Image: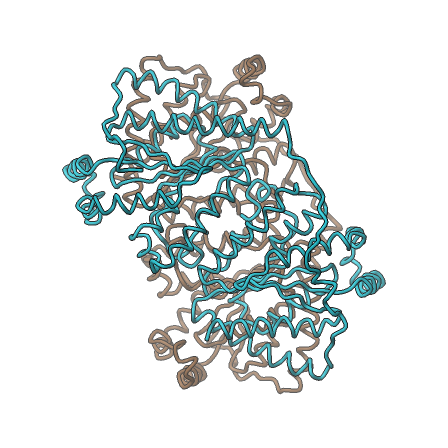
Chain colours: A brown, B cyan
Amino acid sequence: MLSKTDLNQSLDKKAYKETMEVLEKKLALLQQALWELKIPVVVVFEGWGASGKGTYIGRVVYPLDPRYFNVYTMDKVNEDMQMRPYLWSYWVNTPMAGRITIFDKSWHRIMLPAGCEKWRLKQAEINNFYNDVNAFEQQLTDSGALIIKLFLHIGQEEQRKRFRDLEKREDTAWRVDNSDWAQNEGYAQHLKDFEKMLKMTDTAENPWHIIEANDKKYATAKIYRTLIDRIETRIGAARFQKAAPAAETAADYEGVRILRQTPTDVTVEDEVYKKELDTYQKRMDILGHKLYAKRRSLVIVYEGWDAAGKGGNIKRLTEELDPRCYEVVPIGAPTPEELAHHYLWRFYRKLPKDGHIAIYDRSWYGRVLVERVEKLTPARDWRRAYTEINDMEANWSHHGIILLKFWLHIDREEQLARFKSRQDDPLKQYKITEEDWRNREKWDLYEDAVDEMLAETSKSHAPWTVVESNSKKYARLKVMRTVIDTLEEALR
Amino acid sequence: MLSKTDLNQSLDKKAYKETMEVLEKKLALLQQALWELKIPVVVVFEGWGASGKGTYIGRVVYPLDPRYFNVYTMDKVNEDMQMRPYLWSYWVNTPMAGRITIFDKSWHRIMLPAGCEKWRLKQAEINNFYNDVNAFEQQLTDSGALIIKLFLHIGQEEQRKRFRDLEKREDTAWRVDNSDWAQNEGYAQHLKDFEKMLKMTDTAENPWHIIEANDKKYATAKIYRTLIDRIETRIGAARFQKAAPAAETAADYEGVRILRQTPTDVTVEDEVYKKELDTYQKRMDILGHKLYAKRRSLVIVYEGWDAAGKGGNIKRLTEELDPRCYEVVPIGAPTPEELAHHYLWRFYRKLPKDGHIAIYDRSWYGRVLVERVEKLTPARDWRRAYTEINDMEANWSHHGIILLKFWLHIDREEQLARFKSRQDDPLKQYKITEEDWRNREKWDLYEDAVDEMLAETSKSHAPWTVVESNSKKYARLKVMRTVIDTLEEALR
């Protein structure tokens, strides 16, 4: 892509001025339209050293309303970033609906030799990241975001000249260092590396735009034209979509029936329970500290029927853990801010640092459970969620996160008995609501949703365990045993 | 406080077991009550090395529901913390209404010689921090939070024994380092330092509780009793308050009348405007980079009448700034999450890192403007806000933040003209709402509020500038000139 680019493009002063006046007005109007249509936009600036990324970002935001965009510089890898999966810092900075986020340098850098080094990766691991990165972009665009990727391209001669000019001036000399000169001297090799990076991440939906940047006027105008073009196309699509919403089809599940095959009558004797609980809790405490020492993190997901005993189960699991090592994250209905982001955004924000444990009490699986059954989300969106969630969990596991997911299973009769006993107990009445009774009526629909979820998203690096929970004690022991076995295997 | 403590307290096994059973149940019930009454609680664990902070935190959370508390370990000072005012990392981690936050080590440490060193402070600056810290606690309790400060006290002999025991075991040896032994050897001096720290921050409302911790059982029971005591008292107060809300009095302002004395007819010629705007913008660009180089940060507050031209003014100010250096923070009605915190919490979250600029489009002054006039907040609360805001801004300035506040002033006739022209322009109609007309009817009440705000909160380290804004061009130049003059003075 780069080597065949004609870098001798230019624009004279007069043509430039006239062009820009029109383009600036247009971009400002398009920003308003994006805001009204609630479309989030991500703009990526990549390119050679001294290709002018900072300058062009300044030029692009010039006509924009500063209250509705953000600029992030991503080349420094700080501790917070290093202790989480590679894409985390991009995820948490994705724009809200209607806003524009500009990244100065991007997630694609990990595919360059220097990026590998910074993140201490072996070349063989790069393929994982290639998949993760493309999945990330796909997820954002699937949720309605627009991604525009710009690569600023200059020639070797031009770069050398710019470095020299920078070095000459007292106030800019600090901006050129040895690694810059190394890039210039090894230009041919770096060109190949960039080419590969671009090729690996150039997709039909999210293509790279090469900006010939030897001539600043030409480059500015081309960047503007590219942005305007892509935004206009996206807005056109949004208006079209609004006119004709995709048809929704309710779907019956016809695959493997896991829940119906799960026995619910397994139980455990009180004496055995006490003894094992004590043993397991002590073991958990030790493993928690071992996780910390080895800087691995653990994510546990709790899902299950209403009244299945999630709260008490979590309580036993964490009881002997060092409270500085874990966090329980209760997931309720999303806030307006969360709704204005990709649905996975809020879970990224709570992702544990290396060495820590996060326990999600309900989770991103709400997308294919309550949102499906209650028709809060169109079928095409929750269907896509299986892939999105698998991609996300794969990405986490590439970073070394250990992931376990539990479905606490009780049968209908047990649920009814628990609902009734809650209603009769003044101390527990607050735990039972009209909504619980309504959910209960949709048992069959939920069973479809759970079975399909288990079939679609149980992976070796992120397995589901169905936990027989008619006996709360049995359920607690089973969860702890599963966690302990997994940790001992992973931390060996 | 410490030297006179009798450390020979203890509890036998049987008494301990019986006591704890009762206390654990009680604490669990109190947590529910806190949640129902929406009272946020902050618990601080301070004390000697090896006094058992981690262990006791584990014991305290044991009976608690893990979904409603958080534990933060605060002894490591990371880059993110260092680039913001000292109290920032505590502010952003204050609990939501009804939740409990436990800090392992606390904001009081800055008063110890080691804390001074970590934060590179001169001893003379400590007085600032003493004021800031007490103001922080006062603000939290004034807003309804409960703060419980525990100091774990052990003797020199006991500490030596514990360090030795830790060193003996392979898995705990790493926990003892040179600084620990230094504390033990210099016990007498450290005792004095701790005494001073405790004395400086022991207030009637937020007292320190000394926990004699040579005997673990005794200490555990005393910690539980202290927590239960304080929580019960706080809950009692909450129930009492609910029964008898404080009377509200509307207040007329009788102080200095700044707005009425502000001329609104000042203006600037087009040619002069163009020339000066260009000069100022170029200067702003240079000063922005200088701020970054000197790692100073700048906070600018915009307040003003509806239609006074805030948006356009901000636009001109930022137009030539490097977009990676600044962020514009539009402030609207608070979200439910924000409402569940102290009203200043959301502004702390957006505080710029050292070297950066944050421009707040409306701000924390909403507390004494719209919340006062619209009676959204009781008079005793917005009256207290003057002190709270002054304390906060003083704390920021102690960190080196440069703070400027602008009131964009237009007169009634000019506002009417602008409202009408907005209503007639299809492109600008969205900018004018029923609410704007309603606010306009309350002009006199707002004038009271603004004048009082200016009189109460204009300080040399955080001055208000009233900007004559009937001429938008004049207003833009005046803001930029003020910013430039301040920065040149501060960065000299």
In this image, B148 relative to A491: left or right? Answer: right
Give whichever of B202, A174 is nearer the camera. Answer: B202
Residue A165: percent from left, percent from top: 43, 85
Which residue shows up at 59% across the image and 40% down it? A334
Front residue (pair B359, A418): B359
All told, the count of numbered labels is 0
- The x and y percentages for residue A249 are 67, 37
**Picture coordinates of residue A184 (x, y %)?**
38, 79
Q: Nearer the viewer, residue A202 or B348?
A: B348
Residue at point 18% right, 41% down? B173
Look at the image and tell me in which quarter the N terminus of chain B lies.
top left
The residue lying toward the viewer, choosing from A200 and B162, is B162
Is residue A479 in view?
no
**Residue at 55% in and 81% down:** A216
Q: Quadrant of residue A479?
A: top left
B306 versus B172 height, above or below: below
Q: Is residue A223 above or below residue A7?
A: above
Relative vertical location of residue A264 with respect to residue A178 in this rendering, above or below: above
Q: Position of residue A341 (x, y in %)?
A: 58, 49
A347, above or below B453, in the image: above
Left/right placement of residue B409 relative to residue A388 reads right
Q: Residue A409: tell me if it is visible.
A: yes
